[in-house]
Amino acid sequence: MQVLNFIAGAWQPAGAGAGFEVRNPADETLVAEVPDSTAVDARWAADAAHAAFPAWKARTARERAQVLKRWLALIESHSEELAQLISREQGKPLAEARGEVAYAAGYVEWYAEEAVRASGEIIQPPVNSKRLMVLKEPVGVVAVITPWNFPAAMIARKIAPALAAGCTVVAKPAEDTPLTSLALVKLAEEAGLPAGVLNIVTCSRGHVADVVGVWLADARVRKISFTGSTAVGKLLARDSAATLKKLSLELGGNAPFIVFEDADIAAAVEGLMAAKFRNGGQTCVSPNRVYVHDAVHDRFVDKLAARVGALKVGPASQPDSQIGPMINARAVEKIERHVADALARGARAVTGGRRLEGNYYAPTVLTGATRDMQLSCEETFGPVVPVFRFGDEAEVLQLANDTPFGLAGYFYSNDVRRIWRVASALETGIVGINEGAVAAPSAPFGGVKESGYGREGSHWGLDEYMHTKYLCQGNLG
Ligand code: SIN
C-alpha cells in the first residue's frame, strides 16, 4: 500500500519531508510511518479539490454512481486485507474488523444507489404566470476529519455521500489510524476517481491544528464533516464561523440504557453486550450508563456479570479474542480514573475492575453507580458497564436526560404504551428499542444537544452535502 499523501492524483510525501509512526496498540510494534503534513500540504489539497470541483459536479449522477460502484467492488475484493489492516492499526478483533469493512462497504453501496435519487422539486406557484422550482446542488469542497475508532466506516460514510452529491474532498484521518483510510483512497483511485476529487493528508497530533486550520480559514472549503469529541466540535464550529461553513458534527455521547421491570431480561443482556462491547466499548453510541429497575436488578446483574466475565481479551492475532486493546495508554488511564473514582464513591466491581497488561482493560461490571461519579457525566470509552438502580419511569427519564449529550439511548420494555412514551421522551438522536445494534447505512445517524448536528447515512446524509437552490421563473403569461 502507499504510505504517502494523495493530492491532485499523485502520491507524495509531506512537503516538509517529515513522517510519524503508527503503532499497533496490541503490542506497540511499528506498523508504518506516514507523512507528517503541515499547512503547506493542506493548502495543496484544498487547491486540488477546488480545481477538480467544476468537472466532478458536471458529471451526471449516474457517472458518479458508477465510480462509487467500482470503488465498492474493489473494497469487497480487498476486504480481508482491509480487515487485517484495521486490526493492526486500531487493535479490534479480526471478526469485528471484517464486520467494519462490510459496514463501510454498505455506506459506499448505499450512496452509489442514492446518488441518482438526489432530486429537486416543483412547487405550486402563488400565480399561474410563475414557475417555482428547487434544485439540489453540491456544496463544493468538503473537509472530512475522521476518528480512530472505526477507521474504515467513518471515512466511507463521509466520503461516499460527498462524492455522490458532486462534492470534492480533502480528508484528514485520525493520527492513530491513518492507514486504512489511505488504503481506501488507493482503491478509490483504482476505481477511476479523477485527480483532485479526493485528497488525503495525514499528520501527527502536533500538526492537526495547522492542517485543519488551513481548511477552516479557506473560504473555498464549504463544509466540514467531523466525528470526534464535543470539545473539538465546538472549536470547529467557532473557527469555521468566519466563512460560515456548513457543518456536520457527530460528537460525544453518554448513552443511557434502561431496563424496565417488564423487559425480556435475557434479550436486554444480549442487547447490552452487543451495544457496549462493540470495539471494546470505544464507540460513541456505546451505553455509558445502564439503569436497571429495582425489581429486576439482581437477576439482570447476575446474567450480565456471567457474560462479561467470560469475554476473551487479547490481540486481534488471537482468533478467539473478543475485546482488543484500547487505542493507547491515555485511553486506558481514563478508564482507570473513572473506575477508581466510582469505587471510591461506593460502587462495587462485580467482575473486572482492573487494568491488564499493556493497553488492555478487563471487561468490567460495576454496581451501585450514582450520578456523582465521573463515569455518569463523561464517556468512559472502554469495556466498563456501570449499573444504576431506579424505581420508576419518571425518575429514570429524568436521570437519562440529565446530560448535555444526546447521541443514542436504549431501553428494553414489553409495554407498548411505555415504548412510545419513552421513545419520545428520550433526548437523543437515536433510540434503540429492545435492540442494541442500531446503526445501518439506510438510517440517519447523529445526535442532538452537545452530541452535535447533521446526519450521516440515509437520504438525510446525502442532503448534508447539498444545498437547496430555489428558481422562480416569471412572466409566463
Ligand atoms: C461512532 O462511534 O462514532 C460510530 C459508531 C457507529 O457507526 O455505529
Image (cartoon, grey):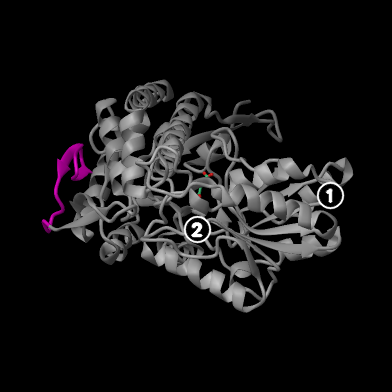
**The disc label shown at residue 421, or none:** 1
Q: Secondary structure at mark 2?
A: loop
Q: Nearer the viewer, mark 1 or mark 2?
A: 2
Residue for point 38% across, 59% down: 359
Q: Nearer the viewer, residue 419 or 27?
A: 27
* Element type where label 1 sits in the image: helix
The span shown in magenta is: 1-17
Q: Residue 320 sits in which quadrant?
A: top left
Q: Judge left or right: residue 256 versus residue 135.
A: right
Farthest residue, direction bottom = 344
Image coordinates for residue 257, horizontal then vertical, percent? 69, 53
Rate crowding at label 1 as few (under 14), some (14 to 19) or many (20 or more) other CA atoms within 10 Å: few
Indicate yes or no whether the magenta region holds residue 12: yes
Residue 56, placed above or below residue 298:
above
Residue 309 vs residue 244: left or right? right
Residue 368, horizontal then vertical, whole percent: 71, 68
| Residue at 38% over, 43% down | 316
User: For the residue carrying disc 2, how many other residues have a C-alpha within 10 Å: few (<14), some (14-19), or many (20+)?
Assistant: many
Q: Quadrant of residue 475?
A: top right
Question: Is the shortest distance between ligand 1 and the CB of mark 1 under 8 Å?
Answer: no
**For residue 195: magenta?**
no
Mark 1–mark 2 Cα distance, whole angstroms, equals: 36 Å
Confirm or reject: label 2 Cβ below 8 Å from ligand 1.
no
Q: Amino acid at mark 1?
A: Arg
Q: Quadrant of the N terminus?
A: top left
Q: Does residue 49 show up?
A: no
Query: Badge 2 is on which residue?
Result: 362
Tell me the quarter of the image containing the C terminus: top right
Q: Is residue 42 left or right of residue 243?
A: left
